[in-house]
Amino acid sequence: MNFDPRFSGRKFASVGTRPIRPDGVDKVTGRARYGADFNMAGQLVGRVLRSPHAHAIIRKIDTSKAEKLAGVKAVITAADLPDLTDGDAAMYDILDNCMARTKALYDGHAVAAVAAIDARTARQALKLIEVDYEILPHVTDVDEAMQHHAPLINDTIFTEGLEEKPVKPSNVTKRSQFGHGDVHQGFGHADFIVERSFKTEQTHQGYIEPHACVASVSSDGTADLWVCTQGHFVYRQHCAQLLGMEASKLRVTSSEIGGGFGGKTHVWAEPVALALSRKAGRPVKLVMTRDEVFRASGPTSATSIDVKIGARKDGTITAAEATLRYSAGPYAGSWAEIGAMTAFACYKLDNVKTVGYEVLVNRPKTAAYRAPSAPMAAFAVESAVDELAKELSMDPVDFRIKNAAQEGTRSSYGPVYGPIGIGPTLEAVKNHAHMKAPLAKNQGRGMACGFWFNFGGQTCVDLNIGMDGSVSLAVGTVDVGGSRASLSLVAAEELGIDYSQLKAIVADTSSLGYNDMTDGSRGTFSSSMATISAARNAIKILRERAAQMWDISVDDVVWEQGHAVAKGEKHGNLGKLSLKEIAAESGKTGGPIAGHSELVADGAGVSFATHICDIEVDPETGSTRVIRYTVVQDAGKAVHPTYVEGQYQGGAAQGIGWALNEEYIYGKDGRLQNAGFLDYRIPVCSDLPMIDTQILEIPNPNHPYGVRGVGETSIVPPLAAIANAVSNAAGVRMTHIPMSPPRILAAIEAERGG
Amino acid sequence: MRYIRPLSIEDAVGQLAGSAGTAAILAGGSDLLVRMKGGFVEPDLIVDIKSIAGLSEIRETADGFSIGAAVPCAVLGENAALKKAWPGVVEAAKLIGSKQVQGRCTITGNLCNASPAADSVPALVAAGARAVIAGPTGKRTIAVEAVPVGPGKTSLAKGEIIEAILLDSQAPRSGDAYLRFIPRTEMDIAVVSAGVNLTIDEHGVVTAARIALGAAAPTVLLVEEAAEALIGRKLDEAALERLAKVCAGACRPIDDKRGTIEFRRKVAGVLAKRAATTAYARAGGK
């Protein structure tokens, strides 16, 4: 395939406009089908039995009574999901997380499941399953889990990344280090040094739609799965591998998605539903309750982070260092590594060192959450940066501008930056009206920067032109943030037709080639690249057909604004042929017209944002109110600006919740105490101000339109921006997220010496 | 599970008294249905009281108001006379859950759910409200604070139903107010709360006071020492500080997922001060 992805600097007709969303009407009228909205004849209700213990050996599971209950069609345990992972440790962890094999590793870990004719019978059956547990000591806190005397969660894990191979197993799965220069020497040149320790509690992605699927395994071994996911192709691979099926025999259809934020990139219930259906011989619907969503899916890491930054009197940072500890749940991942990579990515540093430790704890397996691991690192670093600016008596924006990374800077995690947006977002913030808005008593202003890599990856798109000239676009990246609208705009742009002539769908896994998940802010970036390529392939055919209709050489036909135009002196009298006219004749000129593309989208441009926020603190109660909030972020090119603004606002809203109130609260018994939206406090509408946005467009040189991913960066700065604002309002540095009212009041009282 | 919808209070009482197994009374269902859906309770009998004559009405009586057990909280907010007389009670009822929940939930249900964090209860206790109870042996009237006896437990005997909540006419130069602390702005449960009802004389001196704290002990607390801290004084800075101190001291809170002992004590005092200030202004105090 001959596709040139380089930025071309063209003028746009469709891209950058704000047409209405194609999924809007069905969503507001309730017609849209989410995970739990699919039903089949003869369908059973699946329910999962979960461990009430944080850490326990499963001695024996007796399912005989449950199996005898009238209406129960299948009961499964780990024995019904035999280990077919063939030494693939990551897949084994997924399997073990779906259904505990020898040990329950957290409160909520699945140990058995039933399929029954109705929910009541299924619930009763769960009560009849007898599990004999041997309770083990547990650990849920990231710092405690690193202690030598901490209960060991997996005795086959030895810390990776140490200079000497450890002789004893540990809860620390991996040590990773990034940086360059000599921080010791750098601190020697500093006039001021700030050194602080920070903690952040575990949060959940908080998607409103719980995990839901319907699995139907036929007696011939083929299967269908309808599921709410961010990546149905990946779910197909994982499910097929875990169940010993060929991928092509399992067709996975993704539903509309009521939020994912990274949390719907992992299988939990799906292999279980398939195993139940296989055993029962009937379709099985499995929908998690909210309690299960909190106890068993998501969440993000809890962290403990130390930061040290030094600067000269003139405001130049001479050295920066951070040690970051991330909880991973009971299985290894690479969460701390990402935190260590992103921590200082905003700055131009001669001497920088970050060390990440990933730590096992008896909590649910950590899942990706919007720019996973970056917000916590940014909280710690940007808090210290703010304090250092104060020590230097410098404006916090000016201090950051002085040290901001730019094109050609070697990033703290290795690569050298191309054109980037950190400087421009800071300049925009410096000149933003928000910075001049008056602050009342007990109000404080804070700002902070954030970075995210963005990803590309494997992508496949089909573009089909109907005989009436309308165009259908089949993509394989699940639409979590408006990609059907933005990809339609992109196809309209390339073809030179109107947005209304297009309809985009998310195709199932049997209808299109493999696509990576919608994660890493890749949906619009990578699928737009594939859409442009597919459209160009279709245009090539359209030109050929026009040439045939005119009986001239295709070399004399160009495509302009939705029309084939004949060029050259001989063809001066030929009128233009519209896409519609060419499509109408397609049956006679060679059959259907389509464009296909498959590619690996490389060169996702990194993205930066700077946020400003004003917070009011009630000094008598520690209560907070967000007064103003502004997001400034580089989008590369905003394909559909309204959706881009929505992504900016959404990231800020989730960050506000994380910063102020959201946290997993565990009891001494290792059980999650707030597995519901009442006591796990995501912000309600009235908690938030109108979140203002400013889109900057610094083109990504590796995309034809300059597009960068926009979905994740917006959650990176809020924890820090809000912490800086609260600290300024309360007159005391806040170092523990969430800054819930009891924590703020305690900090104020401590500062008063009370 | 059997669901019935009796038309008279006598029938409802008879069905409840004669039931074997577990029985539950259904008014708005904003607690019961949620608990059933969560699998926490599976009652054998559900008695829906919404069709019983009079139970869905607010009546103005010679002594004040009689609020039927099935009156949704939203309806309290639509009753101008009640709002004028007892703004604190109405604002408390209008804080429960969300707008949608307020269209279903009742103050009687809130009382009988017996949560120490129930929003309407401290306001009702401060207002001196009483509950009219119908039972197999006839009717009785008790102070609302005598209904809950612990988290999730009431003093009601088998077969007893609260028929109405009585509120007296507000005395002249009186005002009530209710405040709760939640980390969010709505859709939340009180971490701690305070209801205050004050009467003042023509000089602004407090002559009567009732102060109740929520989520500060296993049941809503009526803090008599707090009333003593105000009676005979104007509501000046010193009186407010004394009130806060007494309220903080009277709390017997717990550490839990919603707040710490330390936090609840401090904020109970702060809320009592602020609610007293509002109640004082409503009474005409300056």
Image: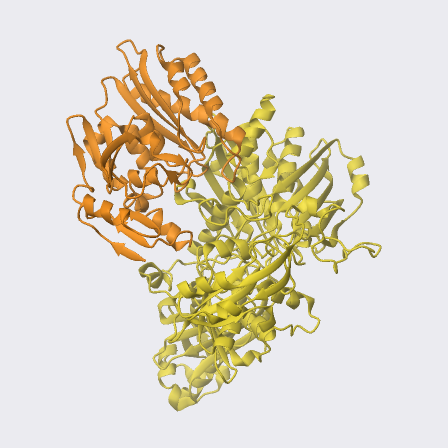
Which is nearer the eye, A504 or A313?
A504
Please identify the residue farthest to the left as the structure is shown. B62
Residue A148 rendering spot, x and y as whole percentages: 76, 47
Q: Is A243 situated above or below A371?
A: below
- State the residue at coordinates (52%, 82%): A221
- Chain in yellow in the render: A
- Chain in orange in the render: B
- State the residue at coordinates (36%, 78%): A469
For residue B179, side relative to residue A399 (left or right):
left
From this viewpoint, is residue B267 visible? yes
From the image, which quarter does the N terminus of chain A lie in?
bottom right
Q: Quadrant of residue A465?
A: bottom left
Which is nearer the eye, B50 or A290?
B50
Residue A3 rendering spot, x and y as whole percentages: 58, 73
For residue B248, side relative to residue A717 (left or right):
left
Which is nearer the eye, B219 or A689?
B219
Q: Is A309 situated above or below A528?
A: above
Residue A82 rendering spot, x and y as whole percentages: 62, 73
